[in-house]
């Protein structure tokens, strides 16, 4: 039997303590104020960290790294965009590399030719929400499931198979997100390292250094092939040729996530 993540056990422990204190308050004297405040604050802090770092598995399992073999998964979010996605495809093609693209549904509907181009080049497609809702982790599980299915339909409308891998917008995961993903029958995907290139003005040199430090067997890197509103060029695009060169030098092969999820 697979061991439960320490973060999930910690959240359950905090919950058990809260129930105990509540029962004590109902049946006997109320607990002291300071321990109660500290305990409640700790519970909120722990729960919030679980949303920001879903790789800890606090609310459910997230696929965030591969096996310990000389392979690395490059993933790109927020596309497709005619302004920037072709540049990523060109760099990958020049290196003979494949990647996984987590697409925004409304963009897939607007640019079905790019959806087909990504798939035709041998890359894998994933889901990244229909509107890229920044408050997605706060949405109810039924709404999460509907959004996932709507995004699947938008991508399938381009004439490609419906993806079954889902990275939530911003990458945040709550228990509601987990339940919604289960209802939709998709696999939640996180990462082992973030490029942090999703902000205007991100330093290309820092992004490159961050990604190269993360290169190791089984690494799953999260980057962007487009900005959320297509109003700037993510730093990862300038960094990508150098990153691919670093992979070659370290004898690490870039693979799609299917190389790991189907074995």
Image: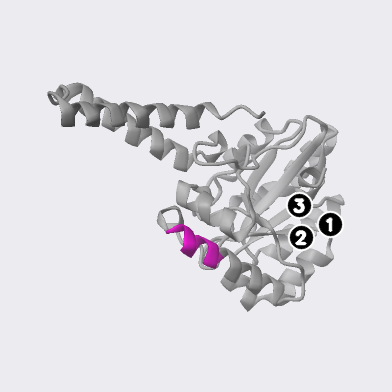
Do callouts 3 and 1 mark residues in contact (Cβ within 8 Å)? no
Residue named by callout 1: 93
Circle 3 SS class: loop
State the predominant SS element of the stretch in magenta: helix
Q: Identify which residue is drawn at 76% across, 39% down.
A: 72
The one of 31 and 39 positioned closer to us in this rendering: 31
**Residue 88: which quarter of the image?**
bottom right
- The residue that disc 3 covers is 99
Q: Which residue is mark 2?
A: 89
Picture quadrant of residue 155: bottom right
Q: CA distance from mark 3 to mark 1?
A: 10 Å
Mark 2 and 1 residues: CB-CB less than 8 Å, in contact?
Answer: yes
Asked if residue 125 lies left or right of residue 36, the reply is: right
Residue 225 against residue 154 in the figure, above or below: above
- Bounds of the magenta segment: 140-147
Q: In front here: 135 or 12?
A: 12
The answer to which image quadrant residue 134 occupies is bottom left
Q: Nearer the viewer, mark 3 or mark 1?
A: 3
Q: Position of residue 63 (x, y in %)?
A: 65, 42
In the depicted structure, whether residue 241 falls above or below residue 111: above
């Amino acid at each position: 039997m697979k061991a439960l993540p320490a973060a999930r056990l910690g959240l359950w422990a905090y919950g058990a303590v809260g129930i105990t204190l509540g029962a004590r308050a109902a049946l006997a004297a109320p607990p002291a104020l300071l321990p109660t405040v500290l305990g409640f604050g700790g519970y909120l802090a722990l729960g919030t960290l679980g949303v920001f770092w879903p790789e800890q598995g606090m609310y459910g399992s997230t696929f965030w790294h591969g096996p310990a073999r000389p392979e690395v998964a490059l993933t790109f979010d927020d596309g497709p965009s005619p302004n920037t996605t072709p540049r990523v495809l060109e760099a990958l093609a020049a290196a003979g590399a494949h990647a996984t693209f987590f697409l925004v549904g409304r963009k897939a509907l607007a640019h079905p030719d790019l959806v087909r181009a990504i798939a035709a080049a041998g890359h894998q497609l994933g889901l990244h929400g229909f509107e890229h809702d920044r408050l997605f982790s706060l949405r109810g599980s039924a709404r999460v499931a509907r959004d996932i299915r709507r995004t699947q339909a938008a991508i399938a409308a381009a004439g490609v198979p419906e993806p079954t891998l889902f990275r939530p917008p911003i990458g945040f995961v709550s228990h509601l997100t987990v339940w919604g993903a289960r209802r939709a029958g998709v696999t939640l995907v996180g990462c082992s390292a973030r490029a942090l290139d999703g902000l205007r003005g991100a330093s290309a040199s820092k992004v490159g250094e961050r990604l190269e430090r993360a290169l190791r067997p089984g690494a799953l890197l999260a980057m962007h092939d487009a900005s959320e509103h297509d109003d700037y060029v993510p730093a990862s695009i300038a960094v990508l040729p150098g990153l691919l060169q670093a992979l070659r030098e370290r004898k690490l092969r870039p693979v799609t996530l299917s190389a790991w999820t189907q074995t």
